[in-house]
Amino acid sequence: MLKKKDNLWVLFNGKEYCVGLTKEAQEELGAVTFASIQKAGTALKQGETLVELEAEKAVSEFPSPLTGVISSVNEKSINPLIP
């Protein structure tokens, strides 16, 4: 089941939790010009910064909705400016 918290969606796929930016947050931010996300293997507590985004309309930090260790990162989502 998909849940939303703090402009992030959270989905448990039966093995691990996947987290992403909601469509609403993407529309509010506009085109992302820079993204900084914690690396795989990083342990985070709920509320600690998971990702920082710079976009045409705002600069935003998004807190981790969960406590745990990041198992993987979608590298294509980190810097959309690099093909």
Image (tube, rainbow, N blue to C red):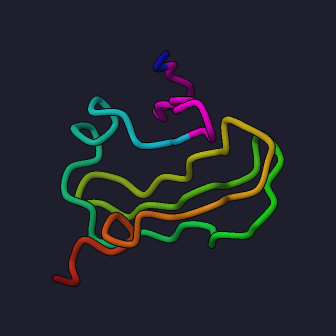
Q: Nearer the viewer, residue 29 or 2?
A: 2
Compared across the picture, whether 28 is left or right of 10 comes to left
Dividing the picture into quadrants, the one containing residue 71 is bottom right
Q: At 30% across and 60% down in the image, what residue appears?
A: 55
Dividing the picture into quadrants, the one containing residue 67 is top right
Compared across the picture, whether 68 is left or right of 56 comes to right
Q: At 46% across and 20% down in the image, what residue appears?
A: 2
The quarter of the picture where the C terminus appears is: bottom left
From what the image shows, is residue 10 above or below residue 4? Answer: below
User: Is residue 10 a member of the stretch shown in magenta?
Assistant: yes
Tell me residue 21's x, y (percent).
40, 42
Tell me residue 77's x, y (percent).
34, 64
Image mark count: 0
Q: Outermost residue, bottom direction?
A: 82
Q: Nearer the viewer, residue 78 or 69?
A: 69
Tell me residue 20's x, y (percent).
44, 43
User: Is residue 82 a member of the stretch shown in magenta?
Assistant: no
Q: At 55% across and 66% down in the image, what residue appears?
A: 37
Q: At 62% across and 39% down in the image, what residue appears?
A: 15
Range covered by the magenta-colored residues: 3-17
From what the image shows, is residue 58 above or below residue 36? Answer: above
Q: Outermost residue, front direction?
A: 14
Tell me residue 48's x, y (percent).
76, 50
From what the image shows, is residue 66 above or below residue 49? Answer: above
Dividing the picture into quadrants, the one containing residue 47 is top right
User: What kind of secondary structure does the magenta stretch mostly adopt?
Assistant: strand
From what the image shows, is residue 68 above or below residue 1? Answer: below
